Image (spheres, rainbow, N blue to C red):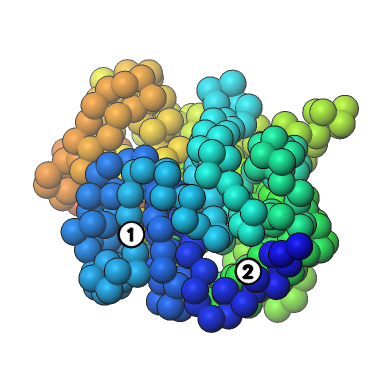
């Protein structure tokens, strides 16, 4: 009777284990690079032919993975990239890093996990370890992956194969915390699963933290991002309350942030963007419905955050009205479309909502973003960034700062603009009590 636990652990220790990364996006490719640099042979699988063609040329399509790393791994035969899932039959270890978006209905879209698991199931063999990294609701690993990879294949988990969940903690563009040095939580279906998966990841990552179950690992990730979403909702509601009372919310938050313990600074804004924070918590509230429980904090915070674009546009209306101007027919310039500063990602960006709502109020809307050359609004309108920022600032009746990229010269913008609504306090002290500036 082969002891697959020992066999696998020794293969990880002597680097003879063949590692497959299923999904080569902003999570999978950095993970492939980290394991490749640790001396493993990597089988990179992704259905997107374009990604695979780029990798085969020894180039990287992910900003956090330098092309020279991919070139070195490909040239050394340590990274084999393919759209052909059948190479998984050679794998000893498989990490699944596929997207988990939401459907239009707000329910989890499990299609990527299901198709990846169904493909992998075709190539399952005794002596494999599988780790799911995609953020998902608690129970996914046990309820979906375990039957498809185990009992339906005649394999016994914890003996013939090993199955665990390990939440991704990749923050694209961040340089201080990377895949290599960010502590990694690992929770197995059985203790042996945790042990084998931890032994695997520990060969390359600096710190792996074992927890007692896959559910604990799945839920820890949702707590991390739900914590952020709820606290952002709190300061967004604080901004609404401060405006009612005529108090400067930015001053209030800065004052609270002087507390050296027991407080963590979050800042209000025009809404919640990105592919993690607005989405991950809804995986938890959705799952809780199966337990006849309403996750009220999540639903309330989600409601407040979702309403912020509309709140911002109403404040823009008020700012114009207070100056005897009408938004309808006016020229509005939205500054910053990416979902957060200094990146080129527009997924779920509140800028898309603000642009759409300004258009619905009859404004003539343009946008500028050095990272986002073009965009489609939720109503499918295609727009390109204005080519000449300062000309657009001078032409606009109101400039609406939505995302505060560092590259903007806010002093020059303030000098040339007629009126600015600053939803991010991008102008800082420049904008405080300035006749041309209204802040969230
Ligand atoms: N936001 C606010 N106020 C804040 C912080 C964020 O309005 O105080 C907005 C941002 O503008 C953005 C959205 O929330 O639209 C999300 O911002 P984020 O800073 O949470 O950035 P993300 O979405 O890139 O979150 C990722 C997450 N990383 C992972 O899931 C692995 C999150 O856990 C990280 O904490 C976050 O990066 C980070 O710290 O940069």
Residue at 22%, 31% (x, y): give it: 383
Give the structural element (helix, strand or loop) at label 2: helix
- Find residue 360 and report its image quarter: top left
Residue to which mark 1 is pinned: 80
- What percent of the width, then of the height, locates residue 211? 78, 64
Can see residue 433?
A: no
Q: Is residue 183 left or right of residue 36?
A: right
Tell me the residue that label 2 is attached to: 8
Mark 2 → mark 1, Cα distance in angstroms: 21 Å
Residue 193, percent across and down?
Answer: 74, 61
The residue at 71%/41% (across/down) is: 154
- Crowd rating for badge 1 (residues with CA inside 10 Å; few <14, some 14–19, many 20+): some
Vertical position of residue 435 compared to residue 328: above or below: below
Q: Closer to the N terminus: mark 2 or mark 1?
A: 2
Quarter of the picture containing the N terminus is bottom right
29 and 405: which is toward the camera: 29
- Relative depth, front residue between 77 and 234: 77
Q: Count numbered badges in the picture.
A: 2
């Amino acid at each position: 009777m082969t002891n697959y636990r020992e066999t696998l652990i020794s293969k990880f220790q002597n680097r003879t284990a063949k590692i497959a990364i299923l999904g080569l996006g902003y999570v999978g490719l950095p993970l492939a690079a980290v394991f490749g640099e640790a001396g493993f042979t990597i089988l990179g699988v992704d259905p997107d032919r374009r990604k695979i063609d780029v990798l085969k040329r020894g180039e990287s399509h992910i900003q956090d993975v330098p092309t020279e790393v991919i070139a070195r791994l490909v040239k050394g035969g340590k990274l084999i990239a393919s759209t052909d899932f059948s190479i998984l039959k050679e794998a000893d270890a498989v990490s699944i890093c596929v997207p988990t978006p939401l459907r239009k209905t707000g329910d989890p879209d499990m299609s990527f996990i299901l198709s990846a698991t169904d493909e992998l199931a075709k190539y399952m063999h005794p002596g494999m370890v599988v780790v799911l990294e995609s953020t998902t609701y608690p129970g996914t690993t046990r309820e979906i992956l375990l039957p498809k990879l185990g009992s339906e294949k005649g394999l016994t988990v914890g003996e013939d194969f090993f199955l665990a969940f390990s939440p991704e903690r990749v923050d694209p563009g961040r340089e201080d915390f990377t895949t290599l040095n960010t502590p990694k939580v690992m929770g197995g279906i059985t203790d042996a699963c945790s042990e084998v998966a931890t032994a695997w990841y520990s060969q390359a990552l600096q710190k792996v933290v074992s927890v007692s179950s896959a559910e604990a690992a799945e839920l820890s990730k949702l707590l991390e991002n739900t914590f952020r979403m709820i606290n952002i909702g709190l300061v967004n509601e604080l901004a609404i309350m401060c405006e009612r009372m005529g108090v400067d919310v930015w001053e209030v938050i800065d004052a609270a942030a002087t507390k050296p313990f027991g407080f963590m600074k979050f800042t209000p804004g025009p809404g919640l963007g990105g592919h993690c924070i607005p989405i991950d918590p809804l995986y938890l509230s959705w799952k809780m419905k199966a337990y006849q429980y309403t996750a009220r904090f999540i639903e309330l915070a989600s409601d407040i955050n979702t309403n912020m674009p509309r709140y911002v546009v109403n404040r823009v209306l008020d700012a114009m009205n207070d100056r005897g101007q009408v938004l309808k027919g006016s020229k509005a310039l939205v500054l910053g479309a990416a979902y957060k500063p200094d990146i080129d990602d527009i997924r779920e960006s509140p800028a898309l909502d603000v642009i759409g709502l300004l258009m619905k109020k009859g404004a003539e809307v343009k946008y500028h973003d050095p990272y986002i050359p073009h965009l489609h609004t939720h109503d499918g309108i295609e727009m390109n960034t204005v080519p000449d920022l300062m000309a657009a600032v001078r032409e606009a009746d109101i400039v609406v700062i939505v995302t505060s990229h560092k590259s903007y010269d806010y002093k020059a913008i303030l000098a040339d603009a007629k009126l600015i609504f600053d939803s991010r306090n991008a102008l800082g002290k420049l904008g405080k009590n300035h006749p041309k500036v209204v802040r969230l």
